[in-house]
Image: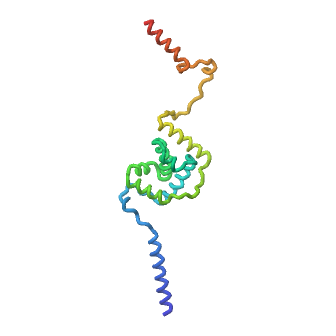
Amino acid sequence: MFKKIILLSAGFLAVACSSNETAKQEAFPGEFANADYVLSEADAQKWVVASNQAKLCIYPNLTRIQQEHFSKEDSYIFSQYVFFYPLEEIIGEQYVKIIQNDEKSMGYAQYLFKKFKNNDAVEELPTKQCATLRANAKNDLAVVKGQYQSGMIEEEKSQEGKASGQKVATDDNKFFFDIIKWGSVLLL
């Protein structure tokens, strides 16, 4: 009889413990049903860490008030470098585009980001990687603001032009070109 009581109590204990574990799992939010891409929780946790690292690298002293007063260009660069580029490194470019094009997928990604976002200290990016990321963000911001920058490496200007002191087609000698232009018109 004693063995039956112990066996039954062990069975009830096992059932009670297993039912407690299933209660801890959260149900999938209904408003995100039929999303084109469902970000996994593991990828979302990696994304939050990578996002915090990028934010600390590019915007180390950013306050909430400063962020609220960003221009459109600054907001665009912030969202690209702090949210989408880190996510792209984790899940790939094509899946980020799917998320960006689907409202439910974007909503679920934001839901997971807020769920796992914390203010714990994150490991900083390596100095070289951070410097590259910061320079790219600065250059992209300049381009978005309308300041064209060539993507090619600029070659050093020849020393011959500097040695002679002559600069062709610059504001320094614009007057000289105007004289030549008007002189040629008068000759014709």
Q: Residue at x 53, y 58 (%)?
A: 118
Find residue 28 and report its horizontal and vertical position in percent: 40, 63
Which quadrant: the C terminus? Answer: top left
Question: Which one is nearer the viewer's eye here, 64 or 12?
Answer: 64
Residue at horizontal 47 percent and vertical 53 percent from the top: 91
Residue 53, percent across and down?
Answer: 56, 51
Q: Position of residue 11 (x, y in %)?
A: 47, 83
- Using residue 185 as the reference point, say whether residue 52 is left or right of it: right
Query: Given the current orientation, which residue lies at the most extreme front position?
Result: 65
Decide which of 167, 34 is in the foreground and name it.
167
Snapshot colouring:
rainbow
Looking at the image, the residue that sits furthest to the top is 187
Residue at the extreme left: 34
Residue 143 vs 28, above or below: the answer is above
Q: How many marks?
A: 0
Q: Residue at x 48, y 93 (%)?
A: 1
Residue 136, percent from left and from top: 54, 41
Above or below, 19 against 185 in this view is below
Tell me the quarter of the picture where residue 155 sits.
top right
Residue at the limit of the structure toward the bottom, as seen here: 1
Residue placed at 45% from the left, 75% from the top? 19
